[in-house]
Image: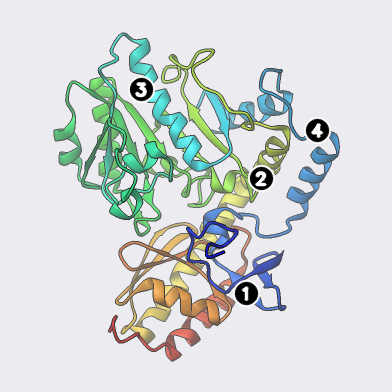
């Protein structure tokens, strides 16, 4: 048989983890890695966090899954907690970020349908965005690598330049339903939107009765030092997609919305077999137990500042490789002067796990529980690796 049992859609590396301890992963042969990838911003409490494990174990012993045809005390409790902590009035739980974005798209369109304007169905999206791998979420992007071979794509999306407010304003027409935007592009290269851009989108939405839909799948849940990144822009969205860190490693996503934005989401308009299952709800509650405190968020901001400062001090020692650091909190990116994917691959051979992104950026996404010694371990290892790295001839 030529094809592998696991469908070969990932270029899987030789890192084969079988165990996790805090901020480290351990491979099949006992290899030890410092994990500053966190499952791509998922394992925000690191690996084997006792409170998260305990909550999942306790719930698994009691009840793992029931149909959403029944009442959900677990889902109601987590939804109530999220609405108390955020702008939202209501929550729909999903199993992934792509599903959370899908629900957000449907909620935005259904809003206008409920108000008697079904022609207002187009969402304005932005260049180099990543919203997931479903048909709707790849249709919302302009990235050829995501779209190639999947035509015909879905209609109802218009892509303009990221962080260009005038381009966004000019794209609004009689069919516009709203904007779908990552406050900080992750896959696109750790690119934070400017405050002027985000505030401008909010103002346009207010002026034209449009939906501001935020994709905070990667930047949400304390990653940037506030529970959600929108708080740092001084705005509130109408709809927000959350996932990745919200389950701490257990598959969980959520679409958060205001009462006004969700007015079209009535019985029969949406659903999910597994979304909101009791086991996922236990994981989500355990994560919020840890991250939703002022002390923990202050810790994230402090560690983010320390890590950024250490990286900025290191860069001049290897200025043939590194250009600059960008991002917020513990969602950082190192802009490189050469191919970031090749360098990320090399770091794996040195026991350091990071993630490549667009614009030749190395994503640095550690567990939010890191301490000073982990910052030192990572930056010292990164610096040593950079000193010995030979830029591939094709990338030189």
Cα–Cα span, label 2 and label 3: 31 Å
Cα–Cα span, label 1 and label 2: 24 Å
Discs 1/2, front: 1
Most distant residue in the top direction: 116
Q: Residue at x 47, y 80 (%)?
A: 346
Asked whether, in this view, residue 69 is left or right of residue 168, the answer is right
Secondary structure state at the residue bearing disc 1: strand
Asked whether, in this view, residue 366 is left or right of residue 152, the answer is right
Q: Residue at x 68, y 38 (%)?
A: 280
Work out whether residue 384 or residue 105 is closer to the camera in this orientation and state it: 105
Cα–Cα span, label 4 and label 3: 35 Å
Asked whether, in this view, residue 327 is left or right of residue 337, the answer is right
| Residue denoted by label 1 | 33
Q: Say few, some or many: other residues with alpha carbon within 10 Å of mark 4 (under 14 / 14 to 19 / 20 or more).
A: few
| Residue denoted by label 3 | 109
Secondary structure state at the residue bearing disc 2: helix
Work out whether residue 347 or residue 155 is closer to the camera in this orientation and state it: 155
| Residue denoted by label 2 | 287
């Amino acid at each position: 048989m030529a094809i592998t049992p696991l469908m070969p859609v990932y270029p899987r590396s030789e890192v084969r983890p079988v165990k996790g301890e805090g901020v480290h992963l351990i491979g099949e042969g006992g290899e030890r890695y410092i994990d500053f990838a966190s499952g791509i911003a998922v394992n925000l409490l690191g690996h084997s966090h006792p409170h998260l494990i305990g909550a999942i174990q306790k719930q698994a012993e009691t009840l793992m899954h029931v149909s959403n045809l029944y009442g959900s005390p677990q889902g109601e409790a987590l939804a109530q907690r999220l609405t108390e902590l955020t702008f939202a009035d209501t929550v729909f739980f999903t199993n992934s970020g792509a599903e959370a974005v899908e629900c957000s798209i449907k909620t935005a369109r259904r809003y206008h349908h409920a108000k008697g304007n079904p022609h207002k169905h187009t969402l304005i999206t932005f260049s180099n965005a990543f919203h997931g791998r479903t048909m709707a979420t790849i249709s919302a992007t302009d990235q050829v690598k995501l779209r190639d071979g999947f035509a015909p794509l879905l209609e109802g999306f218009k892509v303009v330049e990221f962080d260009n407010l005038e381009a966004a304003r000019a794209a609004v027409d009689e069919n516009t339903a709203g904007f779908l935007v990552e406050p900080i592009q992750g896959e696109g290269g750790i690119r934070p939107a400017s405050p002027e851009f985000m505030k401008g989108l909010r103002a346009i939405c207010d002026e034209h009765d449009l939906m501001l839909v935020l994709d905070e799948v990667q930047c949400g849940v304390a990653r940037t030092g506030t529970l959600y990144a929108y708080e740092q822009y001084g705005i509130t969205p109408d709809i927000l997609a959350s996932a990745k860190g919200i389950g701490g490693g257990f598959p969980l996503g959520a679409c958060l919305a205001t009462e006004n934005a969700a007015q079209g989401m009535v019985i029969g308009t949406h659903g999910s077999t597994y979304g909101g299952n009791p086991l996922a709800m236990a994981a989500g509650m355990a994560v919020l137990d840890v991250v939703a405190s002022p002390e923990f968020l202050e810790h994230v901001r402090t560690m983010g500042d320390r890590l950024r400062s250490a990286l900025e001090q290191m860069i001049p020692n290897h200025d043939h490789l590194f250009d600059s650091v960008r991002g917020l909190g513990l969602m950082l990116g190192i802009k490189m002067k050469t191919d970031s994917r090749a360098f990320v691959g090399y770091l794996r051979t040195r026991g350091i796990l990071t993630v490549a992104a667009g614009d030749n950026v190395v994503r640095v996404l550690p567990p939010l529980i890191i301490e000073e010694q982990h910052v030192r371990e990572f930056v010292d290892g990164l610096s040593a690796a950079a000193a010995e790295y030979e830029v591939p001839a094709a990338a030189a």
